[in-house]
Amino acid sequence: MTSIVQEKVSQAVAILQEKDIDMWLTFVRETSAAGDPVLPLIYGHDLTWQSAIILTRSEERIAILGRYEAEAARRTGAYPQVIPYDQSIQPALLEVLERLQPGRIAINYSLNDSHADGLSYGQYQLLCGYLADTPFSNRLVSAESVIAALRGRKTATEIALIRQAVATTGEIYARTFETLQPGMTEIQVGQFMWDQMDDLGVTESWEKAGCPAVNSGPDSPVGHGGPTNIVLQRGHILHFDFGVRQEDYCSDIQRVVYLLAPGETRAPALVQHGFDTIVAAVQAATRAMRPGVQGWQVDAVARNLVTSAGYPEYMYGTGHHIGRTTHDGAGMLGPKWERYWDTPNYPLEAGQVYTVEPGLAVPGYGYIGIEEDVLVTETGAEFIS
């Protein structure tokens, strides 16, 4: 049976051919202390000694690593060439380079993408030292475009796992909505959701202290702070931000509930208008998503719809990649703000999974944020959640 590591290694080789890059070199050490974010995709284990994972456009797949990790490398089924060493990685590394004579060698550094920036400065200096006085030292380029494509373009197996995590998240939300009562605290609601995760054998998509976020009413701090002792009250909006990690893949979904005040049979007009505005923004952004469209263009659709309805601009991006981590890939659905660097300019590609999550506050009632997980297809986009 083909593993995700084998799928992603094969995908990486095809990406190197597409990007016209001769070799991709992932150079790591003691990854339990400082792991390269790409390693779970292309190797699947920690590494101890200095190690080189090498993929080439000519379909070479080579692992150079300490002798005692050679068997684990062979068992991945992804690396036909496993080269163990004892005293120094340099001779084996140079022998491979001299044999293959790569023109451009991509290494893992990036100004834009934290997932492509796994090569530490110390490791970079070591690598440059090993390559000193060779022609290869002048052939190093960023692997950012390779890693962005690899993380972003989900395989069918990855998409199925994300769908599974989304379904489990929906099940926990349904259980939670059935138990909600005025008088409960945010922490009690959060504890119920943590208990459901334990019951279903899953964990949080991000740090447990902030997953789930539970925000009751206008005074609850929205963000990654986690539930508080604020009490759920009738006449308030209850907002959730929550996701699970299941079999190494994540979901990220926001939902809102309105607790009817005495005498009410439906939410007040102000609350309903805010809800309808965010639903429309999510739907409009998703309709705008298709391969080739840049992230800032999708963001602008949702952002302009919210502000044109009379609400303040939300001060975050409309969406981000999701996959093995909650914020998974390079590109984002965001405005051209300095803090996002070049990532809003990345074009969407088929197989990417994004969140779409505009939001607004309704004064006196609370926060409305709806977040859906959306798959980009060859012809547009479809809701997973």
Image (cartoon, rainbow, N blue to C red):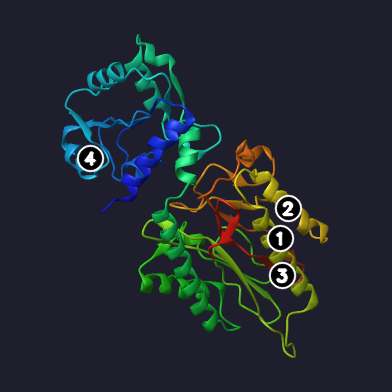
115 lies left or right of 303 = left
| First-in-chain label (3 vs 2) | 3
SS for callout 4: helix
Residue at the top extreme, as displayed: 133
Q: Quadrant of residue 383?
A: bottom right
Q: Residue at x 47, y 24 (%)?
A: 141
- Mark 4 — residue? 73
Image location (x, y in percent) of residue 168: 44, 69
Where's residue 64, x and y in %? 25, 30
Residue 34 lies in quadrant: top left
Q: Which residue is mark 3?
A: 275
Q: CA distance from mark 2 to mark 4?
A: 46 Å
Q: Nearer the viewer, mark 3 or mark 4?
A: 4
At label 4, which amino acid type do we have? Ala
Q: Do labels 3 and 1 touch, CB within 8 Å?
A: no
Q: CA distance from mark 3 to mark 1?
A: 10 Å
Residue nearer the viewer, 311 or 306: 306
For marks 3 and 4 on the same chain, the one whose residue lies earlier in the sequence? 4
Distance CA(mark 2)–CA(mark 1): 7 Å
Q: Secondary structure beneath disc 1?
A: helix
Give neighbour class at mark 3: few <14, some 14-19, many 20+ (Cα, 10 Å): many
Task: Judge whether 333 appears above or below 34 on screen.
Answer: below
Residue located beneath label 1 in the image: 281
